[in-house]
């Protein structure tokens, strides 16, 4: 069980009814199949018609072979209001999707890596302006690259060192090689998972520190390896693997029993698989992480988990750092984490990675909405979010007291469209 259940001897528990695939009836307490106390969606402001649209959307996309399946988990006012499995865990083997299916989280790992680092921050053991070279001296004298017209790279010494804050907010210049075609990009591994397949921790640090930075530290938001380095800093501080650090500081407290970095014989059959063919390109697709052996716990993209686990993680953040009486972070730290850390001086290239995020700044591992409009997706000022390249989605809206987690194994470009569609469906279903 993921939460301590208070004994309720006098209350009758109403059985949850399923209508059109969406949970409708309330329960008096948490059950093994429920990550949070359950309430009917209508009692928390969702319309019946809106719920039908959500249900129809997933069933239609799966029937049209656009995605293999999904698990959707939504909490409103701390209550579980939508919790449904759709389609297939593995379409190729006709294995049905279940709520306990495990998904590769990809970059949704980054938020957990930042949260675990912030527990050290709260202990006074980590400051945001600390240079990375404090732990890894090879990062002390980094060079910033410049590509000439002939394609050659010239370098100049970085004016400032990469800091912990730069790692968390993607202002470090350690770009993902797969996100550009310049000679500088080619010096970097393609991404977090690719780096963990090829290198162990010390090797990836040497690889990153020997490359030319794409930008001067602290000047440009650019997606890359910051959270991987942050995870390795935590390992250096403790002498423990990142998985053990997160288990002690986050997962055990939140009740995230199915989250980790290394598959076991016991859980391997529960992992979701993508469609064999990308529905957009028509080309074969796969996820190397499902079969590869990873050489380090990459904090930028290598964790896995269930919708249930991540919903509890999101609810913990929305609660101000606590859940079921167990504290992970203080409320002021969560507020600090989910505030914009770019300001007006740092160039914001967020929309190059997330096209719908115009009007967003960036906090410590999460995009943070600064304006009610501008963005192509709905929401409120102060909502925060990040997604995963394999098809997973997370956001929290403090004004609506809303947490949304959608898990799918959909690694192609279609995942970006689903982020916008799901957003429209969820907010469109709210009637108060």
Image: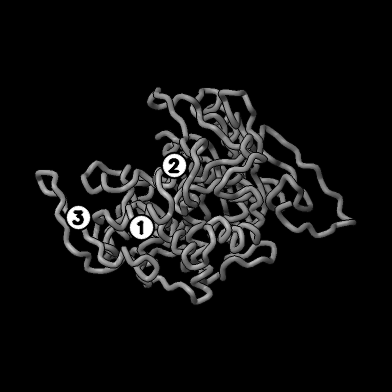
The answer, for residue 370, to whether it is visible in the render is no
State the separation of the CA atoms marked 3 and 2.
27 Å
In terms of depth relative to the viewer, which is nearer, 7 or 82?
7
- Which is nearer the N-term, disc 2 or disc 1? 1
Looking at the image, residue 227 lies above or below residue 421 = below
Q: Position of residue 251 (x, y in %)?
A: 61, 57
Report whether 68 appears left or right of 280. right
- Which is nearer the N-term, disc 3 or disc 2? 3
State the separation of the CA atoms marked 1 and 3.
17 Å
For image coordinates 51% across by 42% down, the residue present is 392
Q: Position of residue 44 (x, y in %)?
A: 65, 51
Report whether 351 appears left or right of 227. left
Question: Residue extending furthest right?
Answer: 10
Q: What is the secondary structure assignment of the residue under circle 3?
A: strand
Looking at the image, residue 42 lies above or below residue 251 = above
Mark linked to residue 389: 2
- Colour style of the rendered protein structure: one colour
For image coordinates 64% across by 53% down, the residue present is 256
Q: Which residue is mark 1?
A: 170
Question: Residue extending furthest bottom?
Answer: 124
Mark linked to residue 124: none
The answer, for residue 410, to whether it is visible in the render is yes
Q: Which residue is mark 3?
A: 145
């Amino acid at each position: 069980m993921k939460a301590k259940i208070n004994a309720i001897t006098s209350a009758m528990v109403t059985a949850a009814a399923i209508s059109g695939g969406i949970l409708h009836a309330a329960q008096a307490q948490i059950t093994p199949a429920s990550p949070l106390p359950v309430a009917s969606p209508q009692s928390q402001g969702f319309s019946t018609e809106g719920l039908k649209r959500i249900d129809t959307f997933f069933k239609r996309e799966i029937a049209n072979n656009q995605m293999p399946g999904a698990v959707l988990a939504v909490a409103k006012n701390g209550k579980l209001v939508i919790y449904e499995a759709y389609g297939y865990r593995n379409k190729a083997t006709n294995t049905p999707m279940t709520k306990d299916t495990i998904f590769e989280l990809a970059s949704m790992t980054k938020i957990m890596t930042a949260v675990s680092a912030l527990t050290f921050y709260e202990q006074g053991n980590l400051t945001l302006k600390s240079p990375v070279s404090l732990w890894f001296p090879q990062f002390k004298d980094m060079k910033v690259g410049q590509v000439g017209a002939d394609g050659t790279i010239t370098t100049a010494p970085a004016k400032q060192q990469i800091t912990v804050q730069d790692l968390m907010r993607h202002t470090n210049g350690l770009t993902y090689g797969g996100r550009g075609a310049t000679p500088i990009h080619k010096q970097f591994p393609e991404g977090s998972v690719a780096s963990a397949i090829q290198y162990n921790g010390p090797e990836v640090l040497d690889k990153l520190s020997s490359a030319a930075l794409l930008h001067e530290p602290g000047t440009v938001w650019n997606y890359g390896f910051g959270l991987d380095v942050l995870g390795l800093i935590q390992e250096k501080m403790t002498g423990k693997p990142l998985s053990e650090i997160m288990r002690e500081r986050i997962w055990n407290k939140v009740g995230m029993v199915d989250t980790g970095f290394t598959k076991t014989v016991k859980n391997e059959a529960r992992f979701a698989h993508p469609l064999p063919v990308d529905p957009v390109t028509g080309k074969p697709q796969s996820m190397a992480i499902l079969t590869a052996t990873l050489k380090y716990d990459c904090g930028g993209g290598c964790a896995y988990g269930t919708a249930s686990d991540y919903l509890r993680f999101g609810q913990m953040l929305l609660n101000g750092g606590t859940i079921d009486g167990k504290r992970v972070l203080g409320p002021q730290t969560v507020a600090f984490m989910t505030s914009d850390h770019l300001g007006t001086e740092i160039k914001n290239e967020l929309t190059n990675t997330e096209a719908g995020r115009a009007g967003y700044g960036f906090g410590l591992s999460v995009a943070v909405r600064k304006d009610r409009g501008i963005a192509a997706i709905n929401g409120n000022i102060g909502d925060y979010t990040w997604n995963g390249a394999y098809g997973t989605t997370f956001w929290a809206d403090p004004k609506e007291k809303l947490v949304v987690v959608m898990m799918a194994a959909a690694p192609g470009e279609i995942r970006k469209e689903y982020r916008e569609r799901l957003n429209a469906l969820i907010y469109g279903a709210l009637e108060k």
